[in-house]
Amino acid sequence: MKSAKPEKQIGDRELLQTTDLPMTTDAILSDFTHYFGRMLGRRTIKIDSPFLYQAVVYAARDRLMERWRKTRNALEVDDSRRVAYLSLEFLMGRLLRNALLNLGIENETTEALERIGLDLEDVCARERDTGLGNGGLGRLAACFLDSCATLSLPVVGYGIRYQYGMFHQRIENGYQVEEADSWLREGFPWEIERIEYAQTIKFGGRSDVQIDASGKSRIVWVDTHDVLAIPYDIPVPGFENDIVNTLRLWSAAARNEFDLEEFNAGSYADSVASKNEAENITMVLYPNATTENGQELRLRQQYFLASASLQDTIRDWCQRHGDDFSEFAAKNCFQLNDTHPAIAVAELMRLLIDEHGMDWDDAWDITRNTMAYTNHTLLPEALEMWPVSMFRRLLPRLLDIIYEINARFIAEISQHWPGDTDKIRRMSLIQEGSQPMIRMAYLAIVGSFSINGVAELHSRLLREGLFRDFAELWPHRFNNKTNGVTQRRWLAACNPALASLISETIGEGWKTNLDELDGIRDQADDPDFQARWRAVKLANKQRLATDLEKKTGLEVSADMMFDVQVKRIHEYKRQLLNVLHAIHLYDRIRRGDGDKLSPRLIIIGGKAAPGYVMAKSVIKCINNVARVINSDPAMAGRLQLVFYPDYNVSGMEKICPAADLSEQISTAGKEASGTGNMKFMMNGAITIGTLDGANVEIREAVGDENFFLFGNTVEEIEALRGSYDPQAIIDGDSDFRRVMDLLESGHFNHFEPGIFDSIIQSIREPADMWMTAADFRSFIDAQAEAGRAYQDEAHWTRMSILNTACSGRFSTDRTMRDYNEDIWHVEPISLESS
Ligand code: 26Q
C-alpha cells in the first residue's frame, strides 16, 4: 500500500494565538456584561431570563476554548494512541456548574454575579438538562468523559444529537403522561457546529460487483439514499488540569437541500419529504423498552452513529498518515457502549475493504484489534437482535459482511469443537427460524479483543451464563470493569456543604483521589464531627423537602428518615416490593403497632418506558397508595409516601445528598451494576439491598455491619425456580396476607375497580420472574432493623460517615484507570509541547 503523508498546506495558519484570558472576578464580570449586552442584545436583568445563564456560559466557554485548542494541538503533535467511546447515549445533565468547578472559577463567578445582585445557584438552575440518555448506561458515559478529561486521557465521546431527549414525565391522576423534551428550543450555548467535518452516510440500495482499473473485482454499494451527518462538539473539561476533551454529537441532515432529480420531475413535495426522512434519524431518543425493540429507525440511528464516527476517525487518520493503515490498530481503540453501536464491527470492515482497498484478513486484523465491547445487561430478552430482512433492505452491504464474518467464525468453531452442530447453532451470529435474526451481542464479541461486564458479579454471570460458549473459546478476552461515578459532580458539586466538611478535615485531595476519603474514618465516632455531619444532612433534607413541596404540593418534614428509591421503573428493580413495605407500615400504624417505628418519608421516582404497561401500572399504584397514606391523619408524623415526578440528573443532584436510606432491591442476578447505589453511598446514605450488581462490592467495601442485607442470592433464586409458590408464602405470613388483603380489597382504588389486578396477579404468579414474594419477609425484617438503627443517632451517623469513607473505589477515576490499564493502553495527554 502506498504511503502518502499529506504535507501541511501553506495557507494553514493558526489564527487564534491568544494569550490566556484572566480567571479573575473582574474579567469574568466584564465578559459577562459584554455577552449579555452586546452579543445577546439584552438590557434589563430578569432573574428568570435564559440570557443571564447564556451570558455566563459564553464567559466560561471562552476560557475553555483556548484550553480545548491546546488539547487538540497536543494530540496532533504527539500522534498518540487514542480512544473513541461510541455510545447512543450521553446523559450529561447540566454543564455550567461542572465547567466552573473544573476550570476552578466557581468562587470568582459567584462573586462576579453577586456584584450585580445575582445568585449563581439561580443562574445554574436556569439550564435545561441535556437528557440524551435513558438512565444508568447514558449517565455512566457522561461520568467516564469527566474522569478521562481529569486523568488527561485522550478519549473522544461519539454520540447522537437527538432533537428530543428523554421525555418529561407529568403525573396526572396518578398516571405517567409523557411530554416531548425540546431541550434545544432556547438554544444550546455549549455546542460548536463543525460543518467542515460532515460525513455522508449510505442507506438502502444494493451491492454490486465491479471490475476496477487493475482488473480486480470489487464490491460496491450502489443506488443508496445518502444522508449527511453533521458534527456538533461539546467541550469536556478536566478538573483543574487545563485539558479539554471533546464530545462529538452527530445530527442528520438531507444531503442536498432538494433532491434535484425528484425536483426536476416536478415532485416538489416528495423532495421536501425525503429531506424530512433524513432528518428524522436524529429526531428522538428511544426509551429502553423491550417492546420498542426491532424499530427500523433505531437501526438507522445505530448505523448512522457508527458510520459517521468511524469515518471521522479515518478522515483524521488519513490527514496525518495518508492511506498507510499499518499503525492504525496500534493507535486507535473503539469502546462500544453495549451492543447499540455494535454494527461498527461490520462498518469498519466495509470502510477498510470497500473504501480503502484493503483485503479481508488485514481489515479483520485491524477490526479485531481495535474494537472492545462493554455489556450492561443480564436479561436475555434485552439482548439486541435485528431481522435479517431489515438489514437486507437498509444495509445490504453490511449484511454481506456479517455473513462473511459468520462463515469464517463458524469454520473456527468447527475446528475447535469438531462435529458439535448444536454449538454452531447456539453461537452463530444468525439465529435461524421463520424470521432469521442477527445477534448483535455475538457480533460484538466476535469482533472485539475485549469483552467486559460492569460489576464483579455481573462479569462472572456473563462468563458462566449468557456468554459461556464464547468465554470457553476465548477466556482471555473476558474481563470485569466495575462501574463508578464522578465525585466532582456527585459529591463536590451536588453536596457543597459535605464537600467543605470533608475538605476541612482531610484536605482537597479526594477530588482527584477518592481513596483519600478513607481519612474521615477516624472521625466516625467523634461527637463534634458527627454533629456537623448531621447538620449537613439535615440542611440537604430541608432543601429537598422544599423542592418536593414545590413539585408535588405535599408538605414533608426533614425530621423523618428519608428512604429513597429513584431509578427507571422496571419489574426487575422491584419498586413493587418497596410499595408492599409501605403498605405494611401503613397497616401496622393503623393497627396501633406503629409507636416504635422511626418516622419515614418514602420517596420513589423514575420514568417508565411509554410502552411498558406493567411499569406504568406500578407508577399509578405508588401514587394511589401515597394518596391514601398521606391523607390519613393516623399517619401524620409517622409515615409519608411520595412519587418524585420527572426524575432526571438534576433531580438526583438534590436527592442523593438528602437520602438516609438507599433502596437497591433488585432480584439477585438482574441488575448488572447500578450506579445510583454508588452516588447514595458517597453522600452518606446507608444501603438496604440484595446481593446484586455492585451492591456486593459496596457491602464488601463498607462492611456488613454498615449495610442492610436481605433477599435470596443468585443461586437461591435459580434453585427456587420451578418450585416457587408465592401463594403459600403469602398464606404463611400474616403481615404479607394483610398487605395483599388491602391491595385486593380495592382499598387503594375504590373508584377505579380492577386497575391493580395485573400487579396483584404478578405477585401471586408462580412464574413471576422477579420473585417479589420470595424476598418479602427478609425485606420487611431488614427494613425493621434499619428503622431501629435510625433511632440510635450516634450509631446511624457513624454508619453514614463510614459509607462515605469507604466509597473511594466507586469513583470513575478508578474505573477509567482500570479500562486504560487492561484495555486501552493510552498515555496521558502532555500539554508541554503545545
Ligand atoms: C434498546 C433497544 C431499543 C431502544 C432502546 C434500547 C435500550 C436503551 C437503553 C436498551 C437499554 C438501555 C439502557 C440500559 C442501561 O441503562 N443499563 C444499565 O447500565 C448501567 C451502567 O452500566 C448499570 O449500572 C445498570 O445496572 C444497567 O441496568
Image (cartoon, helix red, strand yellow):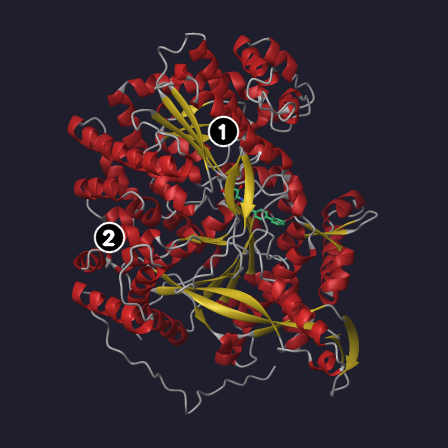
Q: Is 648 located above or below residue 313 in the figure? A: above
- Residue 538 spot, x, y in % from top left: 26, 31
Residue beneath the point at 51% across and 24% down: 625
* Secondary structure at numbered mark 1: loop
Query: In which image quadrant can residue 561 be found?
Result: top left
Residue beneath the point at 52% across and 50% down: 166
* Label 1 vs 2, first from the N-terminus: 2
- Residue 35 spot, x, y in % from top left: 29, 70
**Is residue 626 toward the left or the right of residue 638 in the image?**
right
* Secondary structure at numbered mark 2: loop
Residue beneath the point at 62% across and 52% down: 445
Residue hosting label 1: 665
Query: In which image quadrant can residue 790 be found?
Result: top left
Mark 2 within 8 Å of ligand 1, using the beta carbon: no
What amino acid does circle 2 point to?
Asp
CA–CA distance between discs 1 and 2? 39 Å
Camera-near label (1 vs 2) is 2
Residue hosting label 2: 119
Q: Are dots 1 and 2 in contact, CB under 8 Å?
A: no
- Residue 51 spot, x, y in % from top left: 34, 63
**Is residue 301 toward the left or the right of residue 814 in the image?**
right
